[in-house]
Amino acid sequence: MATTADPAQVTELLEAGPLEAYQQICQTAARGQGAPDAIAQGTCRCLQQRLDDLDQPLHALEDLQAFTEENRLACVFQAILEL
């Protein structure tokens, strides 16, 4: 999840509401990479679903970034198929 947001601001968002923050950061990053809204929303929804399905929730920014990198491509394809 490549984002240009200030790391302190990202950490603050995650502490305030990690799931909502993840969605906001995910969609901002996807749009920043040129993804159309429908693809960005579908990809982030897929990532959120996979995140929710984990046995242990991830809260550290580095863990969320690694999770996103590992799952992004599969979720992009899923979002395209759902169009």
Image: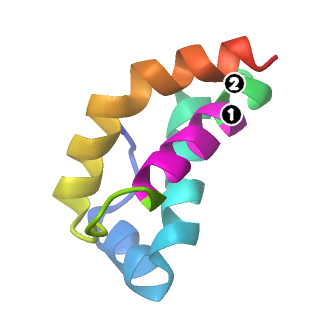
Image quadrant occupied by the C terminus: top right
The amino acid pointed to by label 2 is: Ile
User: Looking at the image, which is closer to me, 76 or 32?
Assistant: 76
Q: Residue at x 70, y 12 (%)?
A: 81
Residue 35 visible to the viewer: no
The amino acid pointed to by label 1 is: Gly
Find the residue positioned furthest to the bottom. Answer: 16
Relative to 67, does residue 24 appear above or below in the rendering?
below
Tag 1 secondary structure: helix
Membership of 10 in magenta stretch: no
Point out the stretch of residues depicted in magenta: 41-51
Relative to 59, does residue 41 appear above or below in the rendering?
above
| Spatial separation of the CA atoms under disc 2 and disc 1 | 5 Å
Q: Which residue is mark 1?
A: 42
Residue 82 visible to the viewer: yes
Q: Residue at x 27, y 31 (%)?
A: 70
**Position of residue 64 measured from the top left corner of the image (x, y, whole percent):** 29, 54
- Return the mark for residue 39: 2
**Position of residue 28 measured from the top left corner of the image (x, y, whole percent):** 58, 44
**Position of residue 48 measured from the top left corner of the image (x, y, whole percent):** 52, 52
Name the main secondary structure of what is drawn in magenta: helix
Relative to 53, does residue 43 appear above or below in the rendering?
above
